[in-house]
Image (spheres, rainbow, N blue to C red):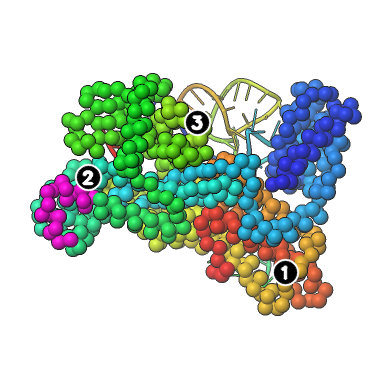
Amino acid sequence: MKIKSQLADLVKQAALNAQNAGALPAFAVSDAFIERPQKKEWGDYATSLPLKLAREAKRAPLQIAQTLAAHFPRDDAVAKVEAAPPGFVNIYLSDAWIAAQVDVIVAQSARFGTLEPARREKIQVEHVSINPTGPMHVGSGRNGAIGDTLANILQAAGHEVQREFYINDNGTQVRHFGESLYVRYAQSLGRDEEFPEDGYQGAYAVELGKAYAEQYGEKYLQMPREQAARALGRIGIERVVAELRATLERMNVRFDNWFSERSLFESGLFAQVFDALKSKGLLYEKEDATWFAATELGLEKDAVIIRSPSIIAEPDERPTYLAGDVAYVWNKVAVRGFDRAIYVWGADHHGDMPRVYAVARALGLDAERIKILIYQFVNLKSGGELVKMSKRTGEFVTLDELLDEVGADAVRFMLISQSINSTIDFDLEVAKAQSDLNPVYYVQYAHARIASILRHAAEVGIASDAGDVALLRHPAELELIRAILRYPEIIEIAATKLEPHHLPHYAIELAGIFHAFYKQCRVVSTEPADAAISRARLKLAGAAKQTLANALALMGVRAPDAM
RNA sequence: GUCCGCGUGGCGCAAUUGGAGAGCGCGUUGCUCUGCGAAGGCAAAGGUUGCGAGUUCGAAUCUCGCCGCGGACGCCA
């Protein structure tokens, strides 16, 4: 990490040196962007600065590159600097410097990969937040995997992170759910009740109704129906939330805070925000309902924020989802003061996104502090056939079932392996049948393999802490160290781009490079002549294990010592 | 119809402010353990990055048009 900015400074210094020497004309030298070349033959790092400077410097890019290379300051970390067409400066790190980093990595151990950001931010990652009216399906699992991994990454990047689940427990939700439960409850007590048209179908509500019947007997049949439905709805939501929590924990997804939507109304916060919007002329009455004038803010259409009494009788059920959203965004940014509020939403909610941004701007909040991430859906397939998932019809494979069949590590790893922008086709048959070939096992195997090597070393009495890393000169050793050194950069990329998928891809690559090293370099050797190199390699293997473990930890995947 | 996402070897996916010769896994073919885990390693075959134009020294990446797939467009949440 530091090396990267160090190299940027060196490149800049090279440009200044060249100018002072009259080899380059005078012009302001911008900060050099240091990148990773695609091929290792092109060095460890490179900059395309000459290509960008060509116009201003009025020189051919390659010539600038050569000039920069010639005036490059001496540095212990840098072994060689070369110009390459069409205008790159390739920088090669010295083997000695690379080898020496192993001690640095080992010293940092579990903290290796954590960054010190220019500015430490207070960030909230709000994710999953599904309606607590039934079990989780696979799509919400993707939400949790993305959200939690991202939170871990941001934390590793040096920020203060809070993970939050927003519980949709407002009036409407409780009643709708409650009515379905009431009917199922009454039915299982032998009553002939008609199921509501918009009710929550599916086996889940039936089971819950039955459980209520067993637990409470006829208690709720004796009170007014509406009251009973509400009460059952409330208990039901609590129960579902507890189940969601348990399911999520199986995937190592945990929250710091469970935030109640209802609380936004009960605390009076919504009323405040409502007044604020009203005073800005962004609310108006039409057909008995209150509308949010989104078109005033450049959006396509207005939206109802308070429903009309003629449609919804109970006052506390009239606020729409938008009402909660406007109060919530104010709560996050203005009340709780998060520097950044990150939302993780499924693609089906992308239409709500512009409204949240618009409301935030209208309320005078800095929209830059709000980031709504939209991830695409998960298609569940079985032997190539699409399995339809729908809560309404109750036909879906639950996340718990998937976890049972495929295993938490594999599920979580697969759900974050793809860019959030692309749809995941999750084939159950493939996931189950090929579980041994799943990349997660490849990574875990590498970790377990190293653990086994370390155990073996301990048995034969070789300690790694005395290893002299300067002995690490074999190409496979250096290759492995280089791969490990990329880890902090992966964290940085994933954190700045808010893209968790870089992590699993990196882990696979690191595992592969370790395997190659292991094939070429004998680690544990009891030959007296090998004692020194054996200790050094053990230390390197330990660094690789630590890095794999750190990466797996951020992904919420176990790093087993044996498998 | 409008808006959002996607389209990359047979399949599933990557590709760091637009960079050099587009990588990885699965699958296929061949090779590789009588010393530390073969769930491993090495090698080979396989691509006009959906199609067409444009911007640029340079495009999988940006712009426009078309085609295909998914999603969103409620006084639902």
Instruction: Give A267 or A262, whichever is nearer the viewer.
Output: A267
State the residue position of label 2. Answer: A175
Residue type marked 3: Asp
Q: Nearer the viewer, mark 2 or mark 1?
A: 2
Secondary structure category for the residue under label 1: loop
Residue type for callout 1? Ser
Span highlighted in magenta in the image = A216-233
At 22% across and 61% down in the image, what residue appears? A211
The quarter of the image holding the C terminus of chain A is bottom right
Looking at the image, is A300 positioned above or below residue A475?
above
- Give the crowd class for mark 3: few <14, some 14-19, many >=20 residues within 10 Å: some
| Circle number at residue A464 | 1
Write down the residue under mark 3. A366
Question: How many residues crowd mark 2 within 10 Å: few (<14), some (14–19), many (20+)?
Answer: many
Q: CA distance from mark 2 to mark 3?
A: 36 Å
Q: Is residue A114 above or below residue A83?
A: below
